[in-house]
Amino acid sequence: MPRAVVFEEHASVLPHWRERRLHGVTVVSLDAHLDLQFIAPEKIARLRACRSAGELAQLESAHPLSPRRDSCYGIEDFLYAAAQIGVLRRLVWVLPPHVLASAGGALAALQQMEGVTPEQIASFHRTPGGWIEGELLGVPVTALQWQQLPALAIAGPVALDVDTDYFVKVPQDRVWVRPRVIATALRERFPAVQELTIARSVGSGFLPLRHRFLADHLAALWEGRHDDERHWQHLLEIETSGAPTADKAAALRALLAVRPGCAATCHALAATTSDAAERAVLLARAAALDPHYGGDVLRHLGEVRVHQEQLDLATVLRLHAQLARWDDGTERAGPAWVALGLLYAAFGRLADAIACDLRSLRHGAGHPDLALQIGRLYMAANDDAGAQRWLERAAADEETRVAAWLQLSICASRRGALQEAWTWANAAHEAAPAWPETGQWLDSLAGKPGTMEAAAQAHLPVAQLDRAPAF
C-alpha cells in the first residue's frame, strides 16, 4: 500500500533511507533548494562508520545555525552524505519555476562551494528534452520541472522525496502549485513506487507555519485517505482564496466545527479573526493540539533570515527582547542567538553581534558564519588585527573556510605579509577553483611588488601567476 513518511526537517530522511537499506538509488527530489554541498572527508568517514540508522541519526545537525559543530550533516548537505555512504547514485532535482528563473544566482553559489571545479560547472548543459544535466561533487544531477518527468528516462530503483517548501514561492509566501497536482503526477510517472518521504521544513524557517498543513495534505493524497484529503483541500482553498477576510473567517469557523481538533485550522482562523481575545484563545488551542504551533522565537528568526524580509533596526531590537525572554537555556536557544547575531551583523552592529555570539557559546563552539560576518565587520572598520581571530575561527569549519581564507589573505596583504597572503589565497583557490574571486585575487596579488619572491618562499607554483581568471 502507498505510504507517506513525514519528517519535521529534511535531513532526517537520511537515516530513514539507511534503515530501509536503500543503495544506489535515483532520488527524485522536489525541493526549492539543492541540498548538495561539500562535507569534509573526516566527517564522511564518521558517517561511513555508522553501523545503524540510529547511529547515523545522532550525527544529524539539529539546526543549520546550531553553534554545536560535532554533527556531520544537515539540511543543506544531506544529499552529499547520502551519495558518500552509497544510498544515492543519481539526483533528479525537480525545482519550482521561480527557482529555475534565478538560476544565475544558484550558479554563483555553486561556484563558491568547496570541492566544485570549473569542469563540474561546465558539465551542466541543456538536453534536447529541455532539462539540465551535469555532475556536481561526483553526483550526476538532472534539474527539471515536474511537467518534464514523463519524458525523463530513469533506470534502477527510485526514491521519491518532497520538501514542502517546494509548493510555496518566497518571499510572497504564495502557493504556486497544489499538492493534488504533484501527487497525481508522481503517481502516474512512478506507479511502482509505494513510499513518499515528505519534509515539513517549518522549524528551520524555510516554510511558513501557516503552510505546515501542506505536508499533511500531500501525505493524505499519497495514501488515499479521502476524508483527510477533502479537509486539507478545503483549508487550502480558503487560504488561497481572494475572499474578504470576514468571509474567510466564517469559512474557517465552519471547517473547525467539523474538525475541532485540527491545529492548522485553529491557527488559520487566529490569523484571520479581527477579535483579539478570540485570536489569543485560538493560538493557545492550536499550540495545545500540536506543540509545533506554539510560540517559537527560533522559528520566527529563521523565517526572517530565509525570507530575507526587509527589517528595520527597531524590529531586530524587538526580536532581541523576545529572545531574551524566551531563552530557557535549552539547545534551541543557541541557533536563535546565532540568527539574531547575523541580523545585527547585517546592520553593522558589531558589539551586538559579538554579544549574541557569546550567548550562543553557552550551547557549543559557535557558528562559523557568525564568526565570518564579525570578522568582515572588523575589516570594514580597517581593524584587520581585530578580524584575525574571528576569521581564523571561521577558517576552522568547512562551511566557511574558503571565504575565511580569502579574507585572511586580504588582511595579510594589507599589512604587507605577501607570503602569508599568497598562502591563504592559494588555499582558497585550490579548495574552490570555480569561484572567480579567488582567481581574481591571486591575479591581483601577482601584480604586487615582491609577490614572485613570496610565492617562491612559500614553495607555491609561480606558474599560477600567469593564470587567467576562472571566469
Image (cartoon, rainbow, N blue to C red):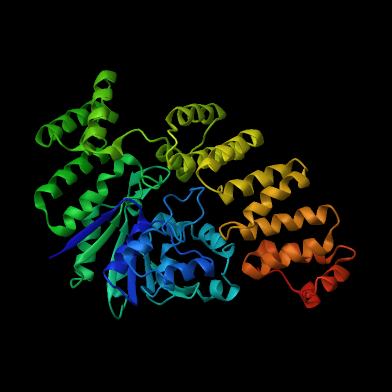
- x 21%, y 70%: residue: 193
Q: Which percent across, then down, holds residue 77?
A: 45, 61
> Which residue in the rendered view is the most extreme toward the bottom?
155
263 on left or right of 38? left
* In this view, 361 is above or below 165: above
Q: Which percent across, then down, holds residue 330?
A: 42, 39
- x 39%, y 56%: residue: 32
> Which residue in the rendered view is the most extreme toward the right?
449
- Residue 431 visible within the image: yes
Q: Quadrant of the N terminus?
A: bottom left
* In this view, 369 is above or below 56: above
Q: In the depicted view, which residue is nearer to us: 224 or 450?
A: 450
468 on left or right of 79? right
- x 50%, y 72%: residue: 137
- Residue 125 visible within the image: no
Q: Which percent across, then down, holds residue 259?
A: 12, 37
Instruction: Name the image quarter holding residue 82.
Output: bottom left
Q: Which percent across, then down, holds residue 13?
A: 33, 61
* In this view, 58 is above or below 138: above
Instruction: Name the image quarter holding residue 151.
Output: bottom left
Number of disc labels = 0
Q: Quadrant of the C terminus?
A: bottom right
Instruction: Name the image quarter holding residue 166.
Output: bottom left
